[in-house]
Every structure is written in C-alpha cells, then in structure tokens.
Image (cartoon, rainbow, N blue to C red):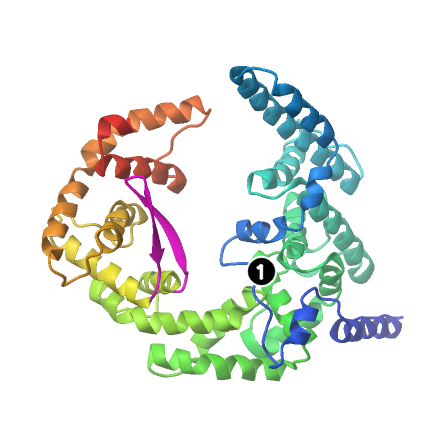
C-alpha cells in the first residue's frame, strides 16, 4: 500500500515538474536564459500589494447578486436632491457591508459543515477573520475563492496526510489557528498561482521542505508560517523550471556572492543563507531583488554610518542593520508622490537621493535644540517632509548656495511643531469621533494623518487648516 502511494506521489511530482501547472510557466518558458524568473507579483509587504495584483482579474465582482438592484437605485437617486443622495449612499454602504458579512458567514458554514453561533467567541473570531479581509482590500470574490481553496486543501490533507499536516497536527477547520494557516497557503492564489498549483504544493510539501532545507537554508520550515509557505512556493518555482537542489544553491551563490563581498568585505555563509531565504520568500523575482538590495546597501552604507556610526551587519541587536536596509530599500523603490502646500511633487528615489537626504538629516540634527532619535519613526516623520522640502521644493542640496540659510528656516518650522500639534489635535480628535473612531497617537496611520495637517499648517495658515 505504501509503495503504491509512493508511486502515485512520484507521478504527481513528475506532473508538477513537466507540465504547465504553474501560472507563470508560459512566462518562464519564454525566457531564453535559464534561471530568469518571471516578474514578481508581490512586493515586500504585505498582503495588501498581493491583493492589488489580483484585483485586475476580478471584473466578475460586478456580477454579484444585487448588482442590478444597486444600479437601479443609483439611477433612481439622480432624481433626488444631493442631501438625500448622500444619506442614501451612506445607508447603502452600511447595508452592503452587513450583506457581505452574511454572505461570507454562509460560505464558512458550508466549509465547516455547521452553523456559526456568533455568541460563541471562537465562531465569532472565525467570521471576524474572514470578513476582516474586506477591510484589508480583498474583494468578496477573492474571499470566496480563498474559502473554497481552503476546503480543497483540507480535502488534500485528509487524503494524502490522513488529516495531520506537519506542525499543524490534526487539521480542524473549527480551529481559528488552523484556518489562518490554511489561509496562508490559499493566499498563494493571489500571488499568481492557481488553486491546482497550491493543492499540488501541499501534496508535495514534504519533498519541497526537505529539498530547500538540505540545499539552501538548512532549517525546518513551518507549514503554519506565512513566510515559510512563500519560501516553499519560491523553491517550487525553481523545481518546476528544472533545477536540482544543488543547481539552485550554485545559482544563488554565484549571483549573490559579489554583492555580499562588496557589502561585508568578504563572503559570509550565514549572511548568504539568511538573504537566500529572503529571496525565496519573495516567491518570484526574489533573487534579482535581493542582489539589487545588497548592492544598494553597499552604496549607501557610508552615508548611513556618517549619521548613526558604524554598522555591524552580522551581530545583534541589528537595529543599525535594519536602518541600513530601510534606506537601501528606499534607494531602490522608484518614484513616490509628495504633497507640499497643496502642490504635488515627485520623489525620484535613488542612491544619490538617499545620500543627499541623510546628509540633510545629519546637518539639521546638529542645529535642532532637541535632536531627533533616528530610530524613532515619529521623530523621523516630523522632519521627513522638510527634508523633501529642501531637496525637491527648493531644489537645494548640501553645500549649495543658500543651504545653511534654508536649514535655519526649516529648524524654526520644526521647533514650532509642538505648538501647532497642540492647536490642531482637538480638531483631529473631533473629526475622528465624528467618523466613529478613536484617535490613537501610537497608531502610525493616525499620527501620520495628524502630521499631514501639521505640515499643511506649517506651510500655510494654521487658522485655515483648522
């Protein structure tokens, strides 16, 4: 019996490695150079970017039940005055939100095989997790696909692993932690994989985990961990392209070694392993991305060290390494919009712009009465827009004529911040309350909103801003 099962799994593996099961296969086969992975469908973040990548494929969302009725209501509302239209729109949004939650509850009940009792904390947590995806930017169709994929994966685990899946143990769809783990697998469909791709990766998970452990990252992977799941998917991409484990190792080492040596002064196997893992976790295009990041780290390292002192990349506490990595990522992040005094400007992030930016930060901090903490996001946030103001709005770089005078102007504006924050804070808190929210200054989004208006006030009339 075991031999028969092994033979079937071998046939599945052969199918995985020799057929166009991955949605990127057509792109991979069109690349003339072996090892050229298709463009990444996600960025470092987070799931939000993955959602954005999938949204373009979900025009069918418009065909949800009730869509025609909403269109008819929209047409009828044109005959009403603007005030009634606004109130109606607000009501419709509330009703639609509740309707979506009810729809998701129905899908979950079909998945679990029983009704959800929302007076039960666990059942409520299950519904909150899945309906909360809508607030993260997922569409209703995407949530449905994810729930459906979770069911497919559970069936595969039941059949191929007798219901017990590595660190998860016996998989229970009524256990919120198990559902979240299966969601991490299912979410690969929002990174370019099909449901069948993901199912086959689950079936072959032991092969992929053993392969990546033996050849590249030398640690056990956890099938519950979102990042580890992406590492498995990244490894599967190379296996599908026809690489052996040894060939993947050689590919990574040959491409990353020059960049690591330029950054550290010599090749370090531990750092290589860490960065190789990071590259795999990007699923697609990770190797090229990491090589570019390492090159940027080497380029901006001197500017970072001029600001915070020597950076020890290999030893804890790694705060300095994180600071260096952040600015290297900025240097490779492309363009970003910037609003100052109601005008939009474009920040062309580059190695040179980061060097200029950090030089201005250093010079400004030497003249501030209360120097900022470089490692505190809120402290850096208070001066970030003003650094862009110097470099972009005024077009002045360190050493240029008028640079020191401009720094004194910026210094005064920054030192006016506490008074302006005190004046604007009641208005912001009141606005949050009107929206049914509670302002929390420790929340980065809330604080960022406040600082947007503070910057507006500093560049104009505070009474008008209020």
For the residue pair 283 and 462, the one nearer the viewer reads as 462
Give me the residue at 64% from left, 25% from top.
Answer: 74
Asked whether residue 465 is in view, the answer is yes
Instruction: Determine which residue is flagged by label 1.
Output: 41
5 or 404: nearer the eye?
Answer: 404
Queried whether the magenta region covers residue 32, the answer comes back as: no
Q: Residue at x 22, y 31 (%)?
A: 461
Magenta region includes residue 349: yes
User: In the rendered structure, which segment of residues is drawn in magenta?
Assistant: 332-350
Quarter in which the C terminus is drawn: top left
Q: Residue at x 55, y 58 (%)?
A: 42
Q: Where is residue 95 shown, x and y percent of the image?
A: 64, 24
Badge 1 marks a residue whose secondary structure is loop
Give percent across and percent down for residue 393.
25, 50
Identify the residue at horizontal 35%, vertical 26% (top origin): 429
Q: Quadrant of residue 261?
A: bottom left
Instruction: State the predominant SS element of the stretch in magenta.
Output: strand
Taking 170 as reference, is 260 above or below it? below
326 with respect to 394 (left or right):
right
Can see residue 274? no
Figure quadrant of residue 110: top right
Q: Residues within 10 Å of mark 1 (few under 14, many from 20)?
A: some
Residue 88 vertical position relative to residue 99 in the rendered view, above or below: above
Q: Percent position (x, y) of residue 384?
A: 27, 50
């Amino acid at each position: 019996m075991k031999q028969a099962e092994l033979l079937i799994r071998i046939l599945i593996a052969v199918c995985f490695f020799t057929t166009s099961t991955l949605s990127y296969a057509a792109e991979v086969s069109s690349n003339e150079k072996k090892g050229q992975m298709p463009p990444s469908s996600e960025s470092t973040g987070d799931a939000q970017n993955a959602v954005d990548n999938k949204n373009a494929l979900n025009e069918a969302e418009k065909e949800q039940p009730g869509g025609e009725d909403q269109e008819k209501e929209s047409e009828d509302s044109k005959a009403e005055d603007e005030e009634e239209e606004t109130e109606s729109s607000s009501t419709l949004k509330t009703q639609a939100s509740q309707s979506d939650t009810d729809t998701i509850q129905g899908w979950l009940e079909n998945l679990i095989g029983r009704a959800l009792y929302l007076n039960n904390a666990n059942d409520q947590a299950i519904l909150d997790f899945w309906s909360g995806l809508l607030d993260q930017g997922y569409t209703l169709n995407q949530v449905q696909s994810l729930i459906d994929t979770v069911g497919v994966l559970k069936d595969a685990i039941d059949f191929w692993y007798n219901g017990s899946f590595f660190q998860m143990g016996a998989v229970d769809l009524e256990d919120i932690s198990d559902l979240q783990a299966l969601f991490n697998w299912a979410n690969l469909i929002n990174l370019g994989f099909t449901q069948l791709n993901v199912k086959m990766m689950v079936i072959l998970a032991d092969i992929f985990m053993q392969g990546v452990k033996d050849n590249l990252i030398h640690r056990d992977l956890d099938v519950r961990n979102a990042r580890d799941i992406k590492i498995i998917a990244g490894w599967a991409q190379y296996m599908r392209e026809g690489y052996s484990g040894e060939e993947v190792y050689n590919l990574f080492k040959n491409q990353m070694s020059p960049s690591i040596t330029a950054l550290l002064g010599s090749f370090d196997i531990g750092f290589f392993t860490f960065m190789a893992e990071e590259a795999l976790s990007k699923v697609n295009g990770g190797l090229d991305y990491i090589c570019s990041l390492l090159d940027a780290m080497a380029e901006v390292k001197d500017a970072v060290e001029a600001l915070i002192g020597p950076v020890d990349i290999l030893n804890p506490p790694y705060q300095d390494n994180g600071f260096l990595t952040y600015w290297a990522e900025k240097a490779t992040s492309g363009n970003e919009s910037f609003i100052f005094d109601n005008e939009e400007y474009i920040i062309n992030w580059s190695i040179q712009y980061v060097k200029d930016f950090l030089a201005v930060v250093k010079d400004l901090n030497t003249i501030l009465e209360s120097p900022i903490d470089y490692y505190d996001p809120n402290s850096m946030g208070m001066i970030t827009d003003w650094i862009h103001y110097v470099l972009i709005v005024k077009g002045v770089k360190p050493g240029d004529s008028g640079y020191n005078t401009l720094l004194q102007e910026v210094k005064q504006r920054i030192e006016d911040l506490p008074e302006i924050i005190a004046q604007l804070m009641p208005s912001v808190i009141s606005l949050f309350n009107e929206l049914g929210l509670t302002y929390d200054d420790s929340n980065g989004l809330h604080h960022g909103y406040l600082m947007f208006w503070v910057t507006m006030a500093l560049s104009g009339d505070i009474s008008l801003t209020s």
